[in-house]
Image: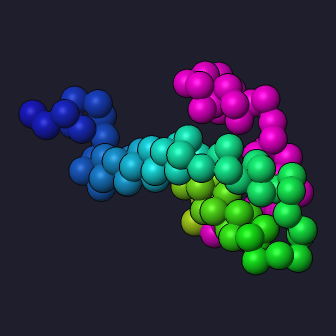
Amino acid sequence: MELYEAEGLSKDAARELAIANQRVDRGLTSLNDNLDDWKTSLEKTNKTSAEYAETISGLRDSFSDLLNIADGNELSLEWIEEWANSADMTAILDGDTEAL
Protein backbone atom coordinates (compact mmCIF):
# COMPACT_ATOMS: atom_id res chain seq x y z
CA MET A 1 0.00 0.00 0.00
CA GLU A 2 1.29 3.44 -0.95
CA LEU A 3 1.52 6.16 1.70
CA TYR A 4 -1.08 8.35 -0.03
CA GLU A 5 -3.52 5.42 0.06
CA ALA A 6 -2.88 4.91 3.77
CA GLU A 7 -3.72 8.59 4.28
CA GLY A 8 -6.97 8.19 2.33
CA LEU A 9 -5.85 10.25 -0.67
CA SER A 10 -6.09 9.48 -4.33
CA LYS A 11 -2.89 9.58 -6.36
CA ASP A 12 -4.00 12.85 -7.99
CA ALA A 13 -4.85 14.44 -4.64
CA ALA A 14 -1.49 13.40 -3.23
CA ARG A 15 0.26 14.92 -6.25
CA GLU A 16 -1.67 18.21 -5.84
CA LEU A 17 -0.83 18.29 -2.14
CA ALA A 18 2.86 17.71 -2.87
CA ILE A 19 2.89 20.57 -5.41
CA ALA A 20 1.13 22.89 -2.95
CA ASN A 21 3.66 21.97 -0.26
CA GLN A 22 6.52 22.76 -2.63
CA ARG A 23 5.01 26.17 -3.38
CA VAL A 24 4.63 26.94 0.33
CA ASP A 25 8.24 25.93 0.91
CA ARG A 26 9.41 28.08 -2.02
CA GLY A 27 7.45 31.07 -0.67
CA LEU A 28 8.84 30.67 2.86
CA THR A 29 12.38 30.28 1.56
CA SER A 30 12.06 33.37 -0.61
CA LEU A 31 10.63 35.42 2.24
CA ASN A 32 13.34 34.22 4.64
CA ASP A 33 16.05 35.09 2.14
CA ASN A 34 14.71 38.48 1.04
CA LEU A 35 12.29 39.99 3.54
CA ASP A 36 14.78 42.23 5.35
CA ASP A 37 15.96 43.75 2.07
CA TRP A 38 12.40 44.08 0.81
CA LYS A 39 11.30 45.82 4.01
CA THR A 40 14.16 48.29 3.65
CA SER A 41 13.17 48.91 0.05
CA LEU A 42 9.53 49.52 1.02
CA GLU A 43 10.63 52.03 3.66
CA LYS A 44 13.30 53.90 1.71
CA THR A 45 12.42 53.90 -1.97
CA ASN A 46 9.98 56.02 -3.87
CA LYS A 47 6.80 54.18 -4.80
CA THR A 48 7.33 55.14 -8.44
CA SER A 49 10.84 53.64 -8.63
CA ALA A 50 11.83 50.45 -10.41
CA GLU A 51 13.29 49.08 -7.15
CA TYR A 52 9.95 49.51 -5.38
CA ALA A 53 8.13 47.75 -8.24
CA GLU A 54 10.64 44.88 -8.13
CA THR A 55 10.19 44.61 -4.36
CA ILE A 56 6.41 44.43 -4.66
CA SER A 57 6.74 41.85 -7.42
CA GLY A 58 9.03 39.70 -5.28
CA LEU A 59 6.72 39.98 -2.28
CA ARG A 60 3.66 39.21 -4.44
CA ASP A 61 5.33 36.10 -5.88
CA SER A 62 6.45 34.88 -2.46
CA PHE A 63 3.07 35.49 -0.83
CA SER A 64 1.31 33.82 -3.76
CA ASP A 65 3.46 30.73 -3.26
CA LEU A 66 3.04 30.80 0.51
CA LEU A 67 -0.75 31.05 0.23
CA ASN A 68 -0.98 28.80 -2.86
CA ILE A 69 -2.71 31.50 -4.89
CA ALA A 70 -2.49 31.05 -8.66
CA ASP A 71 -2.72 34.76 -9.50
CA GLY A 72 -0.70 37.02 -7.22
CA ASN A 73 -2.52 40.02 -8.63
CA GLU A 74 -5.38 39.06 -6.34
CA LEU A 75 -3.23 40.44 -3.51
CA SER A 76 -3.62 44.19 -3.17
CA LEU A 77 -0.65 46.50 -2.79
CA GLU A 78 -1.96 47.56 0.60
CA TRP A 79 -2.22 43.95 1.78
CA ILE A 80 1.32 43.17 0.60
CA GLU A 81 2.78 46.24 2.33
CA GLU A 82 0.89 45.50 5.55
CA TRP A 83 1.89 41.84 5.72
CA ALA A 84 5.52 42.49 4.79
CA ASN A 85 5.80 44.66 7.90
CA SER A 86 3.61 42.66 10.26
CA ALA A 87 4.53 40.87 13.47
CA ASP A 88 2.63 37.86 12.14
CA MET A 89 4.99 37.62 9.15
CA THR A 90 7.96 37.66 11.49
CA ALA A 91 6.31 34.91 13.55
CA ILE A 92 5.62 32.81 10.45
CA LEU A 93 9.24 33.06 9.37
CA ASP A 94 10.27 32.06 12.88
CA GLY A 95 8.25 28.86 12.46
CA ASP A 96 5.00 29.81 14.23
CA THR A 97 2.43 27.77 12.32
CA GLU A 98 -0.42 29.37 14.28
CA ALA A 99 0.45 32.74 12.75
CA LEU A 100 0.01 31.28 9.28
User: Residue 41 appears at what percent x and percent y?
Assistant: 77, 57
Q: In the image, is residue 82 above or below residue 59?
A: above
Residue ID at (83%, 76%): 49
Residue at (63, 69) in percent of width and height: 71
- Residue located 85% across and 63% down the image: 45
Which residue is more in the foreground, 64 or 87? 87
Front residue of 8 and 35: 35
Residue 55 appears in which quarter of the rendering? bottom right
42 inside magenta stretch: no
Using the image, determine if residue 87 lies above or below residue 59.
above
Q: Where is residue 56 in the image (x, y as percent from the top left)?
A: 74, 64
User: In the image, residue 75 lies at what x, y percent?
Assistant: 76, 61
In the image, the segment drawn in magenta is 71-100
> Taking 36 as reference, is 25 left or right?
left
Residue 60, percent from left and from top: 68, 61
| Quadrant assignment for the N terminus | top left
